[in-house]
């Protein structure tokens, strides 16, 4: 009888171990860093596509990184732009031509996940412009994951003067 209990107990422990190993090998329970890295890469891909679109003068393509909704918000030194149409109008007013757009560079990006479908991105932006002069600053982007991918739902961008290196 004691031998039967040990065999049943051992079999139950092996079965439990097999279930645990299966669960932890399954992606949602497996390596959380791997899932986050895929999401981080997806957000970075949107930012890279935005930067490329901006640098070829395509504001429309740049804006595809934003949530196309009346609930989209953009906060900056000129106040708050609300809704897709408001954000589009803001960009077109502030950057009416290729010369005013310059060449965009994002740097010092930090991505923090706030949940499975939300993220916060901090970073710096810099526009190199020939005639209007360089300008740059910092931004905070709130992202949400939709069925068609990650989109910016709120953008807070500020202009900041960074120390210039000595020539």
Image (cartoon, rainbow, N blue to C red):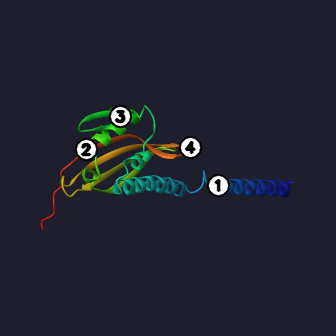
Classify residue 80 as left or right of residue 18.
left
* Pointer 4 or 2: first along the chain: 4
Left or right side of 13 for 77: left
- What crowding class fits label 4: few (fewer than 14 Cα within 10 Å), some (14-19), or many (20 or more)? few
- Label 4, label 1: how far apart the Cα atoms are: 22 Å
Q: Residue at x 46, y 44 (%)?
A: 151
Return the residue nearer the eye: 156 or 105: 105
- The span from disc 3 to disc 2 (Cα, nearest Å) is 18 Å
Residue beneath label 1, please?
26
For image coordinates 45% across by 34% down, the residue present is 69
Task: Kindly identify which residue carries mark 3.
Answer: 86
Q: Nearer the viewer, mark 2 or mark 1?
A: 2
Q: Residue under label 2, please give it.
A: 158
| Element class at badge 1 | loop
> Quick one: 156 or 14, which is closer to the camera?
156
Residue 125 bears which disc, if any?
A: none
Q: Earlier in the sequence, mark 2 or mark 1?
A: 1
Residue position marked by numbered label 4 in the rendering: 147
């Amino acid at each position: 009888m004691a031998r039967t209990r040990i065999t049943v107990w051992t079999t139950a422990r092996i079965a439990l171990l097999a279930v645990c190993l299966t669960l932890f090998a399954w992606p949602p329970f497996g390596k959380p860093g791997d899932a986050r890295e895929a999401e981080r890469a997806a957000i970075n891909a949107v930012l890279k596509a935005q930067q490329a679109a901006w640098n070829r003068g395509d504001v429309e393509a740049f804006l595809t990184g934003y949530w196309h909704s009346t609930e989209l918000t953009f906060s900056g030194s000129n106040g708050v732009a609300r809704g897709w149409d408001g954000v589009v109008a803001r960009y077109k007013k502030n950057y009416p031509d290729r010369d005013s757009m310059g060449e965009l560079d994002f740097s010092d990006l930090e991505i923090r996940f706030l949940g499975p479908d939300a993220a916060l991105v901090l970073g710096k932006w810099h526009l190199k412009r020939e005639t209007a002069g360089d300008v740059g600053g910092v931004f905070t982007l709130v992202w949400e994951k939709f069925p068609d991918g990650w989109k910016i739902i709120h953008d807070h961008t500020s202009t900041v003067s960074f120390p210039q290196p000595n020539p």
